[in-house]
Image (cartoon, rainbow, N blue to C red):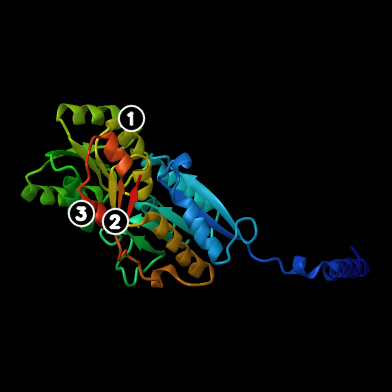
Amino acid sequence: MRIGQIGVAIAVVLGLLVSLPAEAQHLPHVARVGILSDEVPGLVTSFEPFARGLQDLGWVEGQNLTFERRYAEGKLDDLPSLAGELVRLNPDVIFAVGTPAAAAAKIATRTVPIVFARISDPVGSGLVTALARPGANLTGLGTLTRETAAKRLELLITAVPEAKRIAVLWNPDMSTARAALEDLESAARPLDLELIPAAVRGPEDFDSVLQTMLEKQAAALIMVPPSAGWGALMMRARLPAMVTSRDLVEAGGLMSYGTNYADMYRRTAAYVDKILKGAKPGELPVEEPTKFELFINLKTAKALGLTIPHLLLQRADEVLE
């Protein structure tokens, strides 16, 4: 191409740029948020409050924000590959729900910011070095599941005083589950309760767990920590259940005591907002809950033939009827 032709080509390009509308020349950056969770797509409880929290802060899907979602459907072994998929999409930040998801995301990337939620022990699980200054590329919100173990057991037997054998649903693949189980066992001894540990890794374990509950005559059950898909097992067991969140109480659990998960997911959006605006995750302190809520399902109690003590109903933050 001759020099004169090059000059003409440059002039044409410059002319096209000048003629473009101002908004086309200054297109806003569309933030990409990856979501990694152990939840089942049809039973996701984290996305709606999280997205609503972002919208309240000015981030609207389809305008200045796009989501890339990956759900393990309770299959924790799938999380590392799903985390790798998200990292290859080069998101601006990853929202990880649950300890296994956060751990998989941490292994997958040391550079993409990760904001986690529903983590019972962020330091003990090795996700962060300290709550006040997490370091590296992770931060988020914890749940203090272990610290509430004794209280949850106490509330359950207050509602079901005749229950002396209690099944404990736990997932051995979750790094904090064994410690939480040990906390429950310590709390059970002075109460003269027999705990029946029932390991649940996935739906394939449901039949054997139900058989164990039946053979050992479990009179109630308690979940610790939360895991995707356990609501179906709870419904099949037809036992008074201390569950882990309000949505499981709505699904038929007798009661729950602990963090308000919907509020937690909503508040997680503030971390993502700060990171998208330039904050470093390692400098954002991990937040832990200061308020715990008690929910009781009276419809479930009546179906099970239980009469919940009046004083316990008075203590509840909400009674579902």
Find residue 261 and report its image quarter. Answer: bottom left
| Helix, strand or loop status at disc 1 | helix
Q: CA distance from mark 2 to mark 3?
A: 29 Å
- Where residue 140 sits: x, y (%)? 39, 63
Q: Position of residue 42 (x, y in %)?
A: 48, 40
Which one is earlier in the sequence, the residue at label 2 or at label 3? 2
Task: Name the residue type under label 2.
Answer: Ser
Residue, x 40% and y 73% (percent of image)?
Answer: 283
Disc on the earlier residue, 1 or 3: 1
* In-front residue for pair 318/207: 318
Name the element at disc 2: loop
Q: Nearer the viewer, residue 304 or 115?
A: 304
The residue identified by callout 2 is 120
Left or right side of 3 for 90: left
Residue 144 lies, in percent from the top left, at: 27, 59
Residue type for callout 1: Glu
- Label ID, residue 204: 1
Gap between marks 1 and 3 measured at Cα: 40 Å
Residue 203 seen by the camera: yes
Image point 20% across, 31% down: which residue?
213
- Between disc 2 and disc 3, the foreground one is 3
Residue drawn at (39%, 50%), measured in percent from left and top? 101
Q: Is residue 7 above or below residue 48?
A: below
**Residue type highlighted by circle 3:** Leu
Between 145 and 252, the residue placed more toward the observer is: 252
Q: Which mark is residue 311?
A: 3
Q: Crowdedness of circle 1 by 10 Å Cα count: few (<14), some, many (20+)?
A: few
